Image: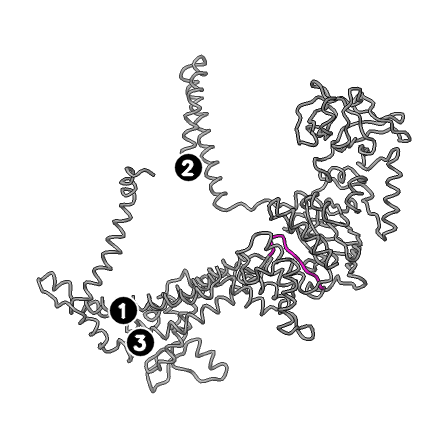
Amino acid sequence: MKVVLQNITKIFPSRNKKEKDEVIAVNDFNLEIPDGKLVCLLGPSGCGKSTTLYMISGLQEPSSGKIFFGEDDVTKLSPENRGIGLVFQNYALYPHMTVQQNILFPLQNLKGENRLSKEEMLQRTAEVAKLVQIDEYLNRKPSELSGGQQQRVAIARALVKMPRVLLLDEPLSNLDARLRLQTREEIRRIQRNTHITTIFVTHDQEEAMSISDYIVIMKLGVIMQTGKPQNVYDDPANLFVAKFLGAPPINVLSGKVENGKLYVGEEQVLDVKGVEDQEVYVGIRPEGFMLDKAGKLTCKVSGVDVMGRDISVVSTSECSLNPVIRSIISADEMCNLSGDIAKFNLKEHKVLLFNKETEERVYFGKQLAVHQKILEEMEAEGQTYVTHDGPLPREADDKVKEAVIPEPPKNVFVRAFNAVKNFFIKVGNFFKNLFAKLSKKKDGETAENPEKVEDAPETKEEVHGEENEG
Amino acid sequence: MKKKNQWKAWLYLLPTLLIIAVFTVWPIINTIRMSLLKNYDSLREIGGASFEFGFANFVSVAKYKGFLNCLGNTMILCVVTVPISTMLALVIAVALNSIKFVRKTLQTIFFLPYVTNSIAIGMVFMAMFTMIGYAPGHEPASVGIINSIIEAFGGTRINWVNAGSGKLENMVVLVIYIVWNALPFKILVLLGGLQSVNKQYYDAAKVDGTSRFRTFWRITVPLLSPMIAYVVITGFIGGFKEYSSIVGIFGDGMGPAGAAGSLNTMVGFIYDNLDTNQGRASAAALILFVIIFVVTMINMWVSKKKVHY
């Protein structure tokens, strides 16, 4: 089932009527999710990816825009009529029911024609349980299962109704690293077997890259880029996407283009013919460095991490925007490293330039051809290449971040305690000043300094004692 | 913790242990002792009298006129009020939890009986149900608000609490009073439980198209079952100790005028006997204790099967 989001916007109204601090969680979101594919919504927290998912599920209603499943407009449909399966971040398995009862629950809700006979229900449950490999645990309670098993029960519960669309909300974030890896493959396998259109929300870029057919990268409610994971990694449309994908993250240096040459600091590191003169951010993937004694980029080495096959050279440069430059090179090249100074040559296709003003990609050399090829490929698959156009949203001039995390309401007792504390501090300060003045008068100006030193800690202790009482 | 420091721990515990010993442990032991001495009386004991040891007090309690009435009244009040008040409290708590507007105000209103003196509430109830200046066979000077309402709807006035009123009417008034008085605590506990239930269970239920009724029975009630068990157990214990509500409405005659003692309860029975025969009062107190203990055990046994912690 194809899922189409058309100009979806979600605005959360402001908390109090006086201040207008409404939050635009999702802003004019357009996306087409092809049938039978696994698509990841990826982005930092607060970027609106979960909100988008909940709008697809029907638990939240978009402020404007339309949602289509196939050709049906489901915007006004309630969740149970949309034919979706939803897996929650913390699974939301009913703790008082066994695994079997949990999986049966959605089936027992069906009414009228759709209602199955008891045998059919049990058979369906058994099939789904087998698919997610929990058929051994059908009579256990959720609390008697491991996190990964609970996760699979949650998926089974979502699948048992044979949904048209399967939605997963950060399903792996409560699992430990090893289980996460395993469950991730499991989800992939289940999706391949069932061919259900699946939408997966995560903030973990590695997870998203490894599992999905397409990824959608979001920031502050806006799509930054969509595409196949490898293509988005190789060909990011802007600085945010480049920084968000990749571990270790991309190294960003400040540089400029002059007369078709790229300068980092004073050093001319690359030929970039055909690029207009401008200030740029130079993004270099960690694997884009080559150690060379005659290299053009000079960095100060601050450490070498040995990882067996590869080594990671940690170095610093004045032009770097990150605290360190991390480069991953083959262990064989280690011999080229001597002393505190590392000299690097750069692999052209691993260097990404971004305009300093707009933070958008500046293509040079063969990169433009690669970009064109990716565009053609996507068009051939019926996918539209979406990137954000217009000025990119920035956290600095956006109130979203502040508004999403409301100020924690202070407890009455905490407030009272603070008031009492402040009062005692004021009283303490008053006496401190008073003593200082008195001693000034008494002993004249010569004795002022030693007195003051003695006085100060005493009064401080007093204040503390009273505080505790308050 | 080293062993030699243990005396310090005991020293710190001493004040509490002393208080418990004097005000809890000793009275329990003393009650048992008194119940086993025939027709025990503390004043006579001081005077040098000795009492026959045995179970005579228990026999005399069982044979005492009015004891079965007291036991019956207590049982009826318990069995009727606890289920009603628990169910009402559950419904009100769920309703309160699902609204936002004026929730705080309603919460306060429902909580008021908890902070009001039960004797005062009893007086108000009496005023509401009474017919002032009523004597059997005569027209009352005026009627309380409940009878006024009944008459406004075309019914005939009912003698709820005055002289000559029937036991059924009296019991209805008592049940209304006790249920209303027991609600706030139960609502408070259940509302607290409801607010700690993860909202995602309801989202999950919604996605699965669960009807409201089914959501309530299959999700809300099981998830609240520990609180419900708590409320029922404490409700039964409180019900067996029912006394002040009857004093509040009917006065310490424990019944309408002309039928004193007809509504007496177990605690009332113990209280009545304190002056005349402390041995019998102690025996009755022990019987009440055993009843409460057995009922609580049954409750626990049932909840072990039905409650999902």
**Between marks 1 and 3, how big is the CA–CA gap?**
23 Å
Disc sitting over residue B287 in the figure: 1
**Quarter of image, res B130:** bottom left
> In the image, is residue B12 part of the stretch drawn in magenta?
no
Evaluate whether label 1 is on the same chain as label 3.
Answer: yes
Q: Nearer the viewer, mark 1 or mark 3?
A: 1
Image spot of residue B5 (x, y percent): 29, 38
Q: What is the magenta range? A: A83-91
- Which class describes the residues within 10 Å of circle 1: few (<14), some (14-19), or many (20+)? some
User: Residue at label 3?
Assistant: B255
Q: Which residue is mark 2?
A: A468
* Local secondary structure at mark 1: helix
Residue sitting farthest toward the left: B48
Question: Could you tell me the amino acid type at mark 3?
Answer: Gly
Judge if badges 2 and 3 mark residues of a common chain.
no
Q: Residue B178 in the image: x percent, y percent?
A: 40, 69
Q: Residues within 10 Å of mark 3 (few under 14, many from 20)?
A: many
Q: Does A85 lie within the magenta span?
A: yes
Q: Chain of mark 3?
A: B
Q: In the rendered image of this protein, does residue B166 appear above or below residue A431?
A: below
Type of amino acid under label 1: Ile
Q: Amino acid at mark 2?
A: Asn
Cα–Cα span, label 1 and label 2: 50 Å
Closest to the camera, between mark 2 and mark 3, is: 2
